[in-house]
Image: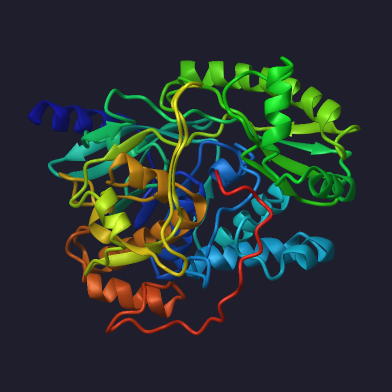
Amino acid sequence: MVNQVQASIQLSSKLPVSYTPDVVVVGGGASGVAAAMAAARNGAETLLIEQRGYLGGMGTAALVPAFCPYTDGEKPIIRGIGLELLEKMKLAAGEAFYSRNKDRLDWVAIDVEILKCVYDQEVLDSGAKILFHTFADQVLLEGDRISGLVISNKSGRSVVQAKLYIDATGDADLAALAGVSFQTGGEHGELQPGTMCYVVTGANKARFDQFLIDSGQNIALENTVIEAQRNGDLPQGRKRISGIAWITDTVAGFNFGHIFGIDGTKAEDLTRAAIEGRQLIQVQIQFLRKYVPGFEDIHLVHSGDQIGIRETRRIAGDYTLVVEDYMSMRSFEDDIARNAYFIDIHLANASSTMTIKYLPKGKSHGVPYRCMLPQGKSNLIVAGRSVSSDRPVQGSLRVMPNCFAMGQAAGTAAAMASVDGGGFREISVSGLQRKLIEQGAWLGERPGYAEHDQTAVSSHIEFEEEC
């Protein structure tokens, strides 16, 4: 540790200090956007660092076609910043899009270019600063604290020195660089496959809807997919389309098919996945044109900048959320969010089976603050799919609405800690919960938890229930 500290001091003395915010957020996906907005809105000087030239993570870079459910089937449980951003995207996408989606909170299609602009504007309006095209490639440590980040971009290498650090990378990149222990995938390191999502134009929604009625199928098109596999027009493996999200009556996004053996923390694997994913899309386009009425004349307009990743690292935190907590719908004294999304673990290879478990409609479980606190680090918090959980629970927590909720909690906690001058474990958790509720979050119907005044909206689902 002494050598590590000395190396950190030597490195930081050679590089210029470019930013000194109260809070730095690394990663601009759903959790990072919410974290930056929450930290800034609560008075902290905040810097959001993102490796790409836009925000949104899997929802924009990987073209995940729709937001997973915000409700437990009866009422919205993901509220606050996450719900605010959903509604602003609906309004910004235009009258036709809003009319189609105004009463929907589950499986709302993502208009990628609109969402990028909404995220830009809302983060800037919160008072946070954004730094695009930038990697954090080294962590400087002093004891149990992070003293700085080394960042790299076109301007060169420099050091960011903050009071508090939020890892919103989705892969726990910052935590791993800081030496935090973690687990990856299943018992043997197996990982859920990735999916290269894409957007097509030239479709005919009315014709497709009639095909569903005539064929007696749902949007997964299982019978049609199996027929094409039998005829050799699709590869064996996934026997259904995971999702089709209609952005307009002629433009649709697809979550379809798997690329196996991909570790999203390895550049070599991401490279192979990009190449194989684009090849698979071309096969799927031919399938859609040949087998699916309404898609005869489609044209591919956008494939993901990277393959969609479902799981990588899970940190060792102060508490590990486990499947028994999920199934018993457990609440915790330090709840900072609620989750009702089903456990959704995609097959690790083409011959294995999927794991899916649902909670009863109207029910949810708590997400404790402690599962975001990495062991051994005092001024670092992790938000998003890499929080401390077992693999089944990660298969539920990993979706974007949950990431918004965890990000809002992390950002609010960071703002509180920046005022108090301590770390994330020194803040008042009850005070954090009060702030979250005051700012629109929902933490369940329990003594001491005020019900936020929001009318429940029924869920109108047209998207296959998998992400």
- Image quarter where the N terminus lies is top left
Locate residue 430 relative to residue 452 in the image: left or right: left
Q: Which of 462 and 418 is in front in this view?
A: 462
Q: In this view, does 418 lie above or below 270?
A: below
* Residue 100: x %, y % from top left: 77, 63
Task: Please name the residue shown 50% across and 31% down the image.
Answer: 153
* Residue 392: x %, y % from top left: 34, 43
Q: Which of 365 and 389 is in front in this view?
A: 365
| Color scheme of the displayed model | rainbow
* Residue 306: x %, y % from top left: 58, 29
Locate residue 406 relative to residue 200 in the image: left or right: left
Task: Please name the residue shown 51% across and 51% down the image.
Answer: 400
Q: Is residue 417 above or below residue 266?
A: below
Q: Nearer the viewer, residue 323 or 158?
A: 323
Q: Quadrant of residue 223?
A: top right
Residue 89 visible in the shown view? yes
Residue 177 visible in the shown view? no
- Image quarter where the C terminus lies is top right
* Residue 83: x %, y % from top left: 55, 66
Q: Is residue 32 above or below residue 282?
A: below
Task: Please name the residue shown 85% across and 51% down the image.
Answer: 249
Q: How many marks?
A: 0
Most extreme residue toward the left is 2
Task: Please name the residue shown 52% across and 73% down the image.
Answer: 75
Q: Quadrant of residue 261?
A: top left
